[in-house]
Each structure stands twice: as structure tokens, then as C-alpha cells.
Amino acid sequence: MIMAQVIDLEGLPDRVAKAIAATVVNLKNRSRGQREQLKPPKELPSRPGKVIGSLRRVDIYDER
């Protein structure tokens, strides 16, 4: 078993330090088997109809 250790985050922006802390908490929870319950995927809205033609990327964007 690995002993607790301190990791120096000095000089990192606050948002990066907070992200690292959140990652550590997530990893600890996973190792304990306390995974969060995932929500089922949300069904996207759709409308009835039929396809009239095709649309390509080059039709939308002027890529040269």
C-alpha cells in the first residue's frame, strides 16, 4: 500500500489546482467502489418528416 504524500502545486493556477484536487477525489471514490450513478441518456427531440436532399460539409462551410 502506498503511503500518503504531499504533492507541491505551487505556481499552478487555482483552476488547475482545483481540477487536480477533484481528480484525486474522483479516483479515491472509484477505488472504494463508490461510483456515481449515471443518468440514462436523454432522448433528443425529433420531428416527423422526410429527407429532401443531401447536405455536405462543403455546402455549409467555405473551406479552401
Image (cartoon, rainbow, N blue to C red):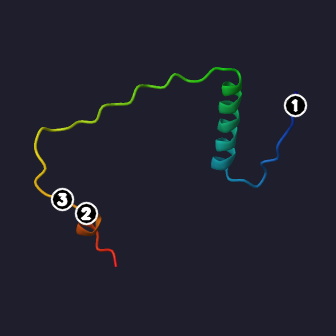
In front: label 2 or label 1: 2
Q: Picture quarter containing residue 23?
A: top right
22 relative to 56, above or below? above
Question: Label 2 amino acid?
Answer: Arg
Where does the image place residue 25, in percent across and percent down from the top left? 68, 31
Side of 16 relative to 52 (left or right): right
Who comes first in sequence, dot 3 or dot 1? 1
Q: Kindly state the secondary structure of the residue where label 2 is placed.
A: loop
Crowd around label 3: few <14 · some 14–19 · many ≥20 (10 Å): few
Where does the image place residue 10, in percent across and percent down from the top left? 79, 51
Q: Are marks 3 and 2 in contact (CB under 8 Å)?
A: yes
Q: Residue at x 88, y 27 (%)?
A: 1
Q: Residue at x 33, y 74 (%)?
A: 63
Label annotation for residue 56: 2
Crowd around label 1: few <14 · some 14–19 · many ≥20 (10 Å): few
Q: Residue at x 65, y 31 (%)?
A: 26
Distance from the alpha carbon under mark 3 to that under mark 1:
58 Å
Where does the image place residue 37, in percent across and percent down from the top left? 51, 22
Distance from the alpha carbon under mark 3 to that under mark 2:
7 Å
In front: label 3 or label 1: 3
Where does the image place residue 36, in percent across and percent down from the top left? 56, 24
For disc 3, the marked residue is: 54
Q: Picture quarter containing residue 60?
A: bottom left
- Nearer to me, 60 or 50: 50
For disc 1, the marked residue is: 2
Crowd around label 2: few <14 · some 14–19 · many ≥20 (10 Å): few
